[in-house]
Amino acid sequence: MSFLERDDPEVAGIIEKERQRQVFGLELIASENVVSRAVMEATGSIMCNKYAEGYPGKRYYGGCEFHDDVENLARDRLCKLFSAEHANVQPHSGSQANQAVYYATIQPGDVIMSQSLTQGGHLSHGSPVNISGKLYEVHSYGVDYESEVLDYGAIADMARKTKPKMIVCGASAYPREIDFKAFGEIAEEVGAVCMADIAHIAGLVATGIHNSPIDVCTYTTTTTHKTLRGPRGGAILCRKEDGPAIDKSVFPGMQGGPLMHIIAAKAVCFKEALSPSYKEYAEQVVKNARVLADTLAGNNLRLCSGGTDNHLVLLDLSDHGITGLEAENALGEAGITVNKNTIPREKRSPFVTSGLRVGTPTVTSRGMKEDEMKQIGDWIGRVINNIQDKNTIMAVRKEVVDFAGRFPLYPDAV
Ligand SMILES: *Cc1c(COP(=O)(O)O)cnc(C)c1O
């Protein structure tokens, strides 16, 4: 019996139910993943017992020598992973990493240009309901209406007109490769700072599958828990000379004590991401997304932008007369977890939407390959194309449970 089962059966029971949901369902949420046992062990370690405000060698508390060691290891590994000069591994989340870059570089009231939330951007890039949208004057760029891909000429024109202090690039729901060099050049032309947020695609950038913003954008922010497959958290990368301002902005500017157990787990994640087997994993994530996209298209579903270059597919359901919300619910009943998502030509509210975002990082971590993607794509097609038919949905559910059970989250778990 575990300590948790003995001391708090209520929480233990809830976690066990969640474990079963993860094991017997198919997780296709593009921002999620399955961490290794080693990452989980570090996350649940005694490193959580310590206050370590400050940075290695300059802490506000005694007894931090081993915390210095682990944070230095995390920083060095992250710099190596992305060929960057300076890393800050303390942001508690991707949103806080972004906030820290804004706080270090621009003033309230300054103009930010970023990709609109409804066309793939992120809340922390200046949405009116987020602090970033309240502090700064935000101008959003979107994708081209016809092609549904970013139009760098139009973005450059907008930058010349709005004269931003900061251009943010990077997205949460954009299936195509982003040209970071183009963004860096636009920012340079108008005298703006450029921040590339690679939260979703960090694992693809780290392995060279996606082009890197490191030498072409001023700041790079990321999460560590999406394709990178580490603990939940954020990080910032920049040049050496910009490091002190970023560090000051994270602590004491934005945060208090760092989550040292998470930083230990980040170090483990970065070591894993430097390994050849991780590169194979990242390549498989992209191959799987392509096969999944083709299979969905073969099931008469429209892909926004016509396909994918990365780990995710954006489906437009508007020609089927069903909403993203209805599709998310029906697929959920079938044991397939996805999220509704606004699409470039959106006509509905973000609570309803006309689209679905489908990603391959988690299923790839479970060992699924091209054949399994064809199977999953066909199930998604069957559910969406028979959305009123409860019998079909229940039949798919049964198949999904049997299938998922053959791909354990932790095959070597004891
Ligand atoms: C997920 C995401 C974030 C923020 O992540 P949190 O850790 O949830 O705050 C930031 N930017 C982009 C583009 C993301 O997709």
Image (cartoon, rainbow, N blue to C red):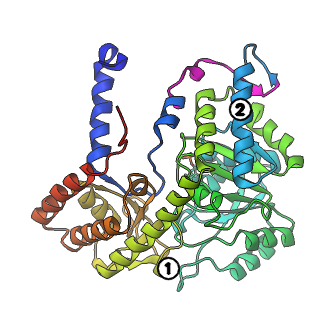
Q: Position of residue 386 (x, y in %)?
A: 18, 71
Proximity of marks 2 and 1: CB atoms separated by less than 8 Å: no
Q: Secondary structure beneath disc 1?
A: helix
Q: Residues within 10 Å of mark 1 (few under 14, many from 20)?
A: many
Quarter holding the N terminus? top left
Find residue 331 and report its image quarter: bottom left
Most extreme residue toward the right is: 241
Question: Is residue 54 one of those drawn in magenta?
Answer: yes
The residue pinned by badge 2 equals 71
Q: Is residue 10 left or right of residue 46?
A: left
Residue at figure coordinates x 69%, y 78% from the top left = 152
Q: Is residue 286 left or right of residue 273?
A: left
Q: Position of residue 285 (x, y in %)?
A: 47, 62
Q: Badge 1 is on which residue?
A: 305
Question: Visible in this render: residue 231?
Answer: yes
The part of the image, by quadrant, that contains residue 186 is: bottom right
| Residue at 85 percent of width and 68 percent of height | 188
Q: Position of residue 25 (x, y in %)?
A: 28, 50
Q: Secondary structure at mark 2?
A: helix
Instruction: Work out whether 406 lies above or below 341.
Output: above
Instruction: Identify which residue, 237 or 326, lies in the foreground.
Output: 237
Residues rendered magenta in the picture: 43-57
Q: Which quadrant of the view contains residue 96?
A: top right
Amino acid type of the residue that numbered disc 2 sits on in the rendered structure: Glu
Please name the amino acid that badge 1 sits on. Answer: Ser
Q: Is residue 262 magenta?
A: no
- CA distance separating discs 2 and 1: 41 Å
Write the residue at 53% across / 54% down.
277
Q: Residues within 10 Å of mark 2 (few under 14, many from 20)?
A: many
Q: Residue at x 46, y 50 (%)?
A: 32
The residue furthest left is 391
Up/down of 89 relative to 52, above or below: below
